[in-house]
Amino acid sequence: MQDILFDFIAKYITLTEEEKNAINSVDIFRSVKKGSVLLSKGQRSKNSYFVLKGCIRTYYIIDGEERTTAFYTEMDALTPHCVINKAPSDYYISCVEDTILTVSNLDMEAEINAKFPKFEIMCRKMSEELLAKHQIDFDGFKTSSPEQRYLNLMRSRPDLLQRVPQHQLASYLGIKPQSLSRLRARILEKDKG
Amino acid sequence: MQDILFDFIAKYITLTEEEKNAINSVDIFRSVKKGSVLLSKGQRSKNSYFVLKGCIRTYYIIDGEERTTAFYTEMDALTPHCVINKAPSDYYISCVEDTILTVSNLDMEAEINAKFPKFEIMCRKMSEELLAKHQIDFDGFKTSSPEQRYLNLMRSRPDLLQRVPQHQLASYLGIKPQSLSRLRARILEKDKG
DNA sequence: GTCGTTTCTTAACTTAAGTGAACGTTTTGA
DNA sequence: TCAAAACGTTCACTTAAGTTAAGAAACGAC
């Protein structure tokens, strides 16, 4: 299972056997059940996550309703906002499916950075890359209608449409479940005609 | 003018006089006229920008229409996507006002990083912080209606409402200029009643 | 200053999302 | 296993954004 982690790291830096052993010696792998809440609003967690298998999501609760803002699946890394700015979290993180992930915190990272300076460089590269990717996603969202966003999702992450409940997808697309149903019906109708 | 730059850097690391001199010795300050285009779609620029005074924006042209996705004002840093992923740019960058900014590129940054390893750390911190900030902005956009977005903007960046043309603001809010006019009239009406 | 362009607003009409409710299906847990 | 809860779809109605068009105001170039 940790091969997924090493494959991911290999995209940024090359690890020696010694370094792999150092990582394996730290106990960071966790298995969590569908529906488990990893982080709640108001908590000051220090944990970052990396998904090896499964799916987790971030969501707000606004006027009593869940508003899902992101899904993280295999090879996705998530450092919650509260870890960076050391303030209580505004949102929740929970498991969409039974999920296997790594849990790390800033102290552990600092320790690894001290032992292997390569990691500092990897972290910077990952942050920059993620930032750029985020920008593009944000731009795509801003410049699209809900229908276009759904069609984009069909292309870019078709697996999500299968593994995520409709009402979570709907709020991820910025609309209500009823509108998603209607929108899907509209698309099917167009496909026929 | 470069005091703004040093104030900004001071938020992340402490500079010695020697380091400040090293920065000043590189010629990075530029003055650009309102309307100038800093980056066009298709270009493979290596330049990053830091706004000292003025305002620049990023925008796409979709179906012949400009779609503004971000504004950068005093103390904002912008590393275009094309610099990170070394691909032709999908979007444009231009000046909303006469603007003074610094222009740097990866080579210059590498040179400074080599001389002063502190910078590598600053860049990582900035990236992480920006990433977290971006997430929050994205979440805010997703979970808001156009009207709520406009009200948020009134609170968080009231200066933008003054210095940016309405049609650019509208596309930034994800709507048409006509809808922004209507929305503003609606808000005024509510304020009265 | 004037002419032309860009910008902003208003209005009438169209289209799509929000709302509230009903109903069948699936999932869940006691 | 069975009842309750959660989920997805459909419908009728409301609300807000898109579209098209027109006109007023501000801005710029000459």
Image (cartoon, coloured by chain):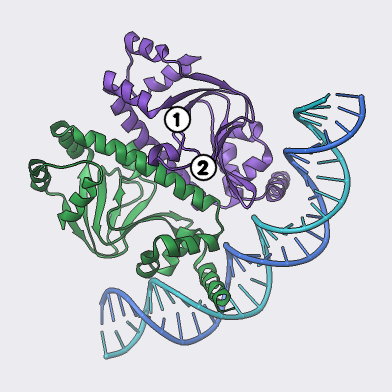
Chain colours: A green, B purple, C blue, D cyan
- For disc 2, the neighbor class at 10 Å (few under 14, some 14 to 19, many from 20) is few
**Residue marked by disc 2:** B42
| Residue A11 x, y percent position in the rendering | 25, 46
Disc 1/disc 2 C-alpha distance (Å): 16 Å
The residue identified by callout 1 is B48
Circle 2 — which element?
Answer: loop
Counting other residues with Cα less than 10 Å from the Cα at mark 1, is it few (<14), some (14-19), or many (20 or more)?
A: some
Tag 1 subunit? B
Instruction: Using the image, determine if residue B7 lies above or below residue D22.
Output: above
Q: What is the three-letter code of the residue carrying label 2? A: Gly
Give the percent coordinates (x, y) of residue C27. 32, 76
Is disc 1 placed on a helix, strand or loop?
strand
Give the camera-side residue of A48 and A137: A137
At a point 32% along the width and 38% down the height, the residue shown is A84
Amino acid type for the residue under numbered disc 1: Ser
Q: Is residue B191 visible?
A: yes
Q: Quadrant of residue B125?
A: top left
Q: In this picture, is B140 found above or below B48?
A: below
User: Looking at the picture, how far across and down is residue A77, in whole percent?
Assistant: 29, 49
Residue in the foreground of this view, choosing between A74 and B108:
B108
